Image: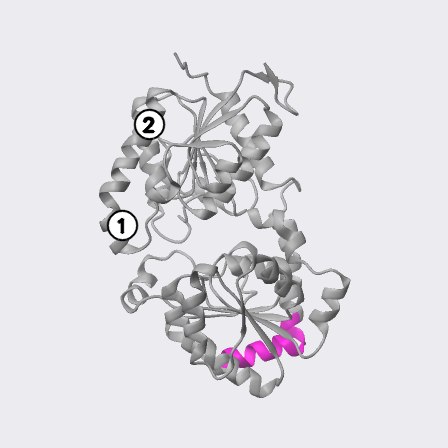
């Protein structure tokens, strides 16, 4: 028997089955596994995951990439493989029921796994790590999940209330993984001095997908050209993934002002710690920038048809994560038909030069620690506690 820290209870050796289908899920799953292993040293892991989860002790039944597809064409081409892997995953769970099933992100795959497993093993505790974005679109997904998921572990602080209002499963906020990376994002004294110095360092973050680079590249190039005219000698740094280096190089080849491209993660975070401002595509990176204390101008553009349909489907008034979390328009955003390089360059120049707009963003960002901090423990630890709580409330599943 193994003691559960802070509960006074004991558990026999744990068998945890995890399923992750994306890189971000692999990171979250690995953090959860490490925390569970500290709390229950006799735990064992099996399921589906990537290199990080495997390094943390997961025995993966097949490569995580087998259940990952981006875009309509990839989904159609890979559908037979994905359906086969889904059946294999469910069969493995049913053949040897674990103590708990943890499904990490990848909602299109994992929600279907949950539904099939719940039909065959109605008493198996099922935990979903990362809430679907029901606050953006398709809110009916929350209620649809309720019969199959015992607990949702949310990474954004407003999600438990949203899930409750929409009739979703019980939801616990466990913290965003970026909260464990504040040391990488925030400057020391020397870096703070460089951040305040001129010429400024400005981050350029047009997105990580090929389609984002294509749609935003021209506008971002024009913003840099206009900003350079106003603030000569500005140093521009464009962090990107190594898998997107060729596309990023092709994009900036047509710009009159070319940023320095970095693909190494250490150099990326070094640039974050010294940057005075940023121009960024909407996405998780806007939350990274806010936590790093970097005033930002954000933009986003989707294909023409999606742009016309989106206003009728979306349930939010902002596309920027810090704005959603803080419930205020702290970060100026230029979306779809309203992308305006001259206005964006002017806004960015004011953020760089200082004044009330820069001060207002920094004051808003300072509130994020309190809003997102929860009890101060790393997200992986809070997630592990929530999984053990679900397990403690559920009857043990026979593995005979």
Q: What residue is rendered at 42% in x and 80% in y?
A: 254
Q: Position of residue 137 (x, y in %)?
A: 36, 52
Image color mode: one colour
Please tell me how many numbered marks the rendered image carries: 2
Distance between the alpha carbons at the discs numbered 2 and 1:
23 Å
Q: Disc 1 designates what residue?
A: 75
Binning the other alpha carbons within 10 Å of mark 2 as few (below 14), some (14 to 19) or many (20 upward) gives: many
Q: Secondary structure at mark 2?
A: helix
Q: Which mark is residue 117?
A: 2
Residue 380 in sight from this viewpoint? yes
Q: Which mark is residue 254?
A: none
Q: Is residue 125 above or below residue 256?
A: above
Q: Position of residue 7 (x, y in %)?
A: 63, 22
Q: Residues in magenta?
A: 343-358
Q: Is residue 154 visible?
A: no
Q: Tell me if residue 143 comes above or below residue 299 in the rendering.
A: above
51 sits to left or right of 381: left
Residue shown at 35%/32% (left/top)?
114
| Along the line of sight, the residue nearer the viewer: 267 or 23 | 267
Q: Position of residue 122 (x, y in %)?
A: 35, 22
């Amino acid at each position: 028997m193994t003691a559960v820290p802070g509960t006074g209870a004991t558990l026999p050796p744990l068998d945890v089955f995890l399923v992750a289908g994306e890189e971000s899920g692999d990171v979250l799953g690995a953090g959860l596994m490490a925390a569970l292993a500290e709390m229950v040293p006799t735990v064992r892991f099996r399921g589906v995951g990537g290199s990080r989860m495997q390094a943390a002790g997961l025995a993966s039944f097949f490569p995580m990439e087998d259940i990952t597809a981006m875009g309509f064409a990839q989904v159609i081409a890979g559908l037979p493989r994905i359906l086969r892997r889904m059946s294999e995953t469910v069969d493995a769970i049913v053949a040897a029921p674990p103590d708990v099933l943890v499904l990490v992100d990848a909602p299109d795959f994992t929600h279907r796994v949950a539904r099939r497993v719940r039909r065959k093993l109605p008493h198996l505790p099922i935990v979903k790590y990362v809430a679907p974005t029901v606050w953006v679109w398709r809110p009916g997904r929350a209620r649809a999940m309720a019969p199959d998921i015992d607990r949702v572990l949310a990474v954004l602080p407003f999600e438990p209330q949203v899930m409750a209002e929409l009739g979703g499963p019980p939801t616990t906020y466990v913290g965003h993984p970026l909260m464990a990376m504040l040391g990488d994002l925030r400057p020391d004294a020397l870096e703070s001095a460089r951040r305040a110095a001129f010429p400024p360092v400005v981050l350029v973050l047009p997105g990580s997908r090929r389609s984002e680079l294509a749609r935003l590249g021209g506008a971002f190039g024009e913003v840099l050209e206009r900003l350079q005219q106003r603030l000569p000698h500005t140093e521009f740094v464009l962090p990107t993934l190594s898998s997107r280096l060729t596309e990023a190089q092709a994009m900036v080849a047509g710009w009159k002002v070319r940023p320095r491209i970095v693909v190494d993660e250490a150099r990326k975070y070094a640039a974050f710690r010294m940057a005075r401002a940023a121009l960024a595509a909407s996405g998780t990176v806007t939350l990274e920038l806010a936590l790093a204390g970097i005033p930002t101008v954000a933009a986003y553009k989707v294909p023409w048809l999606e742009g016309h349909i989106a206003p009728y489907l979306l349930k939010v008034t902002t596309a920027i994560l810090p704005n959603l979390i803080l419930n205020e328009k702290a970060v100026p955003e230029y979306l779809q038909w309203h992308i305006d390089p001259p206005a964006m360059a002017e806004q960015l120049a004011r953020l760089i030069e200082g004044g009330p707009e820069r001060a207002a963003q920094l004051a808003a960002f300072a509130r994020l620690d309190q809003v997102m901090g929860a009890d101060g423990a790393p997200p992986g630890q809070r997630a592990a506690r929530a999984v053990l709580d679900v397990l403690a409330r559920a009857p043990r599943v026979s593995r005979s």
